[in-house]
Amino acid sequence: MSMMKRVALARRPQGEPVDEDFSIEENAMPEPGPGEVLVEVLYLSLDPYMRGRMDDAASYANPVPIGGTMEGGAVGRVITSNDPSLTEGDHVFGMFGWASHGVQPANMLRKLDASVPLSTALGVLGMPGFTGWHGLMEYGRPKAGETLVVAAATGPVGSMVGQLAKAAGLRVIGIAGGPDKCAMACETFGFDACLDHRAYDDASALRAAIAAETPDGIDIYFENVGGMVLEAVLPLMNVGGRIPVCGMISWYNAGALGAGASAALPGPKLWRTILVNRLAVTGFIISDHWARYPEFLGAVAPEVVAGRIAYVEDIAEGLETAPRAFMGLLKGKNVGKQIVKIA
Amino acid sequence: MSMMKRVALARRPQGEPVDEDFSIEENAMPEPGPGEVLVEVLYLSLDPYMRGRMDDAASYANPVPIGGTMEGGAVGRVITSNDPSLTEGDHVFGMFGWASHGVQPANMLRKLDASVPLSTALGVLGMPGFTGWHGLMEYGRPKAGETLVVAAATGPVGSMVGQLAKAAGLRVIGIAGGPDKCAMACETFGFDACLDHRAYDDASALRAAIAAETPDGIDIYFENVGGMVLEAVLPLMNVGGRIPVCGMISWYNAGALGAGASAALPGPKLWRTILVNRLAVTGFIISDHWARYPEFLGAVAPEVVAGRIAYVEDIAEGLETAPRAFMGLLKGKNVGKQIVKIA
């Protein structure tokens, strides 16, 4: 009997995930039913949102059950198709999870063309790139001459935001972890400056450094990290500033987001800044907005093909490496979009 | 020599203002220069934002200096005009402060017509009414069938918001202090229900009561109070909800908005709710938007004249009563728009 492998959630993490929170399971290969497709996974996407799925807390999506396969988007190759829309050998994107193989209804899959590398469907032209594009254009409303700050600047969201903002004529300041990432933000992604948050002891010190790079204040803070960066940036926001909020990775291990994380940033102070600086803060979850994905692809894919939008991928090898790669992602150890090559 | 009276800021309050923070001063009557007008104040507006002006803290407006006249909008009658646009006996609105008389350039004054009572220029047809209208229409974006919650429901902002939302086909739930105000919210202003926040021990208890009145969740929370109401409402917001933020009176006496106020509502939790519930939170200061005031008057004044938009005023008598009336306003002792009749 042919077998498939998957990474299951062994137990719910306490804070940072550790090896024991995951287990590698072998199961019988699933059989596609009518209208379904069996796919061999080639590349698995690792994304910060997956940390939320590991907790048993109300969120915008259901948690992964204990013993269930870790969720995730992936690119694969069709092995068996029971639907006329796909044939063996087609490449597709689908939510196969952390697994070597998967079965999905054909209408849940997106067929990929060959004009760009397959793995880009997970990063620059996938969910993260789309998140950056939609959040910036829809809620950030960039105007030439303004100043934008984004953290995780070399990640697939931050690098998209920064490059689009530069193309729109903004001054773009990145925040990243370590001098190498900062160099990459400027050299590969064209940021005007990038600050290493690890070089500052606290939010005040980071704030002073950001202020020195943003002489006209900050008009857009694209929020994907929370924590010290948010605390540093908030008082620097200009009147009428916009804050699209797509994530807060620095707090994802903080459980109920209570005690520790809260001391530095009281809710009333945050609320008052929104009022006094007349900020527009908009939370969004990209899965609400897939209807605009073709528009994004139409606008951005040609830029990627032409090399005008750069991307960097960090590719781990083998399904078994996924838990460690994910733990690294949550600590910012990846450089660029974190992908696991499965086959 | 003819004299005028004014209420000065004697010292900066520690928390709640007390009598000693104010002083009544007599000064020589000011003389209008070229293009200026001398006005006898008839009605002074008292508004929560004035508490902010008493602190020496960075905000969207400069603090009142010690010894300076308390700021405020007022309606008055022209005594002497050195400008052809106004003549003796004209009624005007202007920023005369807490004073019996004032001099202003004619172009800083707005001439009032006689179709509605003069005092309405301070409430339902003045800054507070305009705040409710602009915030609801621009940032609340009400849609028939949705549910709105607003606190200080019988105040001039809350009652405007509630009545406009009802007219737009929303379910409207008010929050107010005490059973009499709650009855007024429903009977005078047409709210579907109104909850007395004083009847609940904490945010959880208030939340349960609000939840019982909002079976379809909350789409718009018009924020003018902060504190326990915000804490109660936030988890009840529907995905895609909107929160216009025009004030947070419950926190105005909290100084730097630190310690006490923060314990119950950590910033990260607030931020996470904005993300998970995909909320659009927009702070605004109505003075940025005066360009739209004529549009507001055109839309709302006929409704007031026709009696389709109700208003309630709470009128104290005499300039000397202004400090006490203001202290009462901050504690919610007023019923309806707080005004001081000066002459």
Image (cartoon, coloured by chain):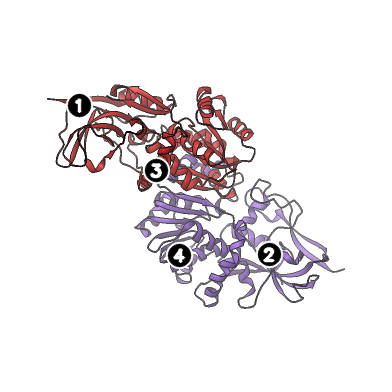
Chain colours: A red, B purple
Which of these two is toward me, A151 or B246? A151
Q: CA distance from mark 3 to mark 1?
A: 36 Å
Tag in front: 1 or 4: 1
> Chain for mark 1?
A
**Mark 2 residue type:** Thr
User: In the rendered image, which quarter is residue A41 located in?
Assistant: top left
Whether residue A156 is situated above or below residue B75 in the rendered picture? above
| Residue type, mark 1 in image | Met
Residue, x 78% and y 68% (percent of image)? B37
Q: Pointer 2 indicates a residue of which chain?
A: B
Can you tell which of label 2 and label 1 is closer to the viewer? 1
**What residue sits right under mark 4 in the picture?**
B165
Do badges 3 and 4 share one subunit?
A: no
What is the quadrant of residue A121 in the picture? top left
Which residue in the protein does label 2 denote?
B321
Q: Amino acid at mark 3?
A: Gly
Circle 2: is it few (<14), some (14-19), or many (20+) Cα within 10 Å?
Answer: some
| Residue A57 position within the rendered picture, expressed as x and y whole percent measured from the top left | 34, 39
Rendered image: mark on residue A201: none
Q: Marks 3 and 4, Cα distance to the nearest angstrom?
A: 40 Å
- Which SS class for mark 4? helix
Do marks 1 and 4 share a chain? no
